[in-house]
């Protein structure tokens, strides 16, 4: 049986068997953001990132809403990759500015999007923003293809010599 550990007030608590860690979760000593670890895990993770235990932890909504129990392996509310936001914004700016900024926002959207996806995938703390990063990538690549098509059309059309 696995022995669990969790962080509390800057110190490590454990080892605990599965029943004891679930009891700590039920008593509220361990919540979705508490770091937990057991042998076989690469690193400490917030409870929300450990599917086998996160379904036992209460999930709190806005004040005044009831507490519910359920799986929470997705991103923690309020944690979004800044690079994902930057990718999407640059993609939008690329399309709004068209060729005025020489495609620099499109290139930035692609770069930020790829870095954001890597960061989201490899982050030990769940991050949101995957959809924004993908949106930025799509807009960036489409603008780069549009610009390349325009340049090719001008060369073939003879306007550029």
Image (spheres, rainbow, N blue to C red):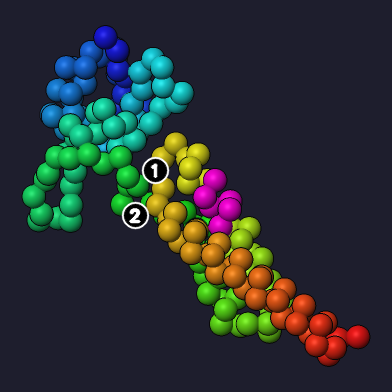
62 sits to left or right of 92: left
Q: In the picture, residue 56 is in which quadrant?
A: top left
Separation of disc 2 and disc 1 at Cα?
A: 10 Å
The answer to whether any part of residue 31 appears in the image is: no
Q: Is residue 146 above or below residue 80?
A: below
- Read off the residue under disc 1: 126
Which residue corresponds to the image point at 10% horizontal and 54% vertical from the top-left?
A: 65
**Residue span colored magenta:** 113-118
Say whether residue 63 is left or right of residue 87.
left
Residue in the picture at 30% in, 40% down: 73
Residue at 24% x, 33% y is 54
SS label for mark 1: loop
Q: Main secondary structure of the magenta part?
A: helix
The x, y position of residue 123, in whole percent, is 47, 40
Residue corresponding to mark 2 = 78
**Residue 30 x/y as whole percent:** 23, 30
């Amino acid at each position: 049986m696995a022995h669990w550990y969790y962080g509390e007030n800057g110190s490590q608590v454990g080892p605990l068997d599965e029943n004891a860690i679930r009891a700590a979760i039920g008593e509220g000593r361990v919540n979705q953001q508490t770091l937990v670890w057991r042998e076989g895990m690469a690193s400490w993770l917030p409870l929300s990132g450990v599917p086998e235990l996160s379904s036992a932890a209460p999930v709190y909504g806005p004040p005044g809403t009831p507490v519910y129990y359920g799986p929470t392996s997705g991103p923690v509310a309020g944690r979004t990759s800044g690079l994902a936001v930057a990718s999407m914004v640059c993609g939008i700016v690329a399309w709004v500015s068209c060729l005025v900024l020489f495609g620099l926002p499109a290139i930035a959207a692609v770069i930020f999007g790829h870095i954001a996806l890597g960061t989201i995938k490899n982050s030990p703390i769940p991050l949101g923003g995957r959809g924004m990063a993908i949106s930025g990538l799509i807009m960036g690549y489409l603008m780069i293809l549009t610009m390349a098509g325009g340049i090719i059309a001008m060369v073939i059309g003879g306007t550029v010599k």
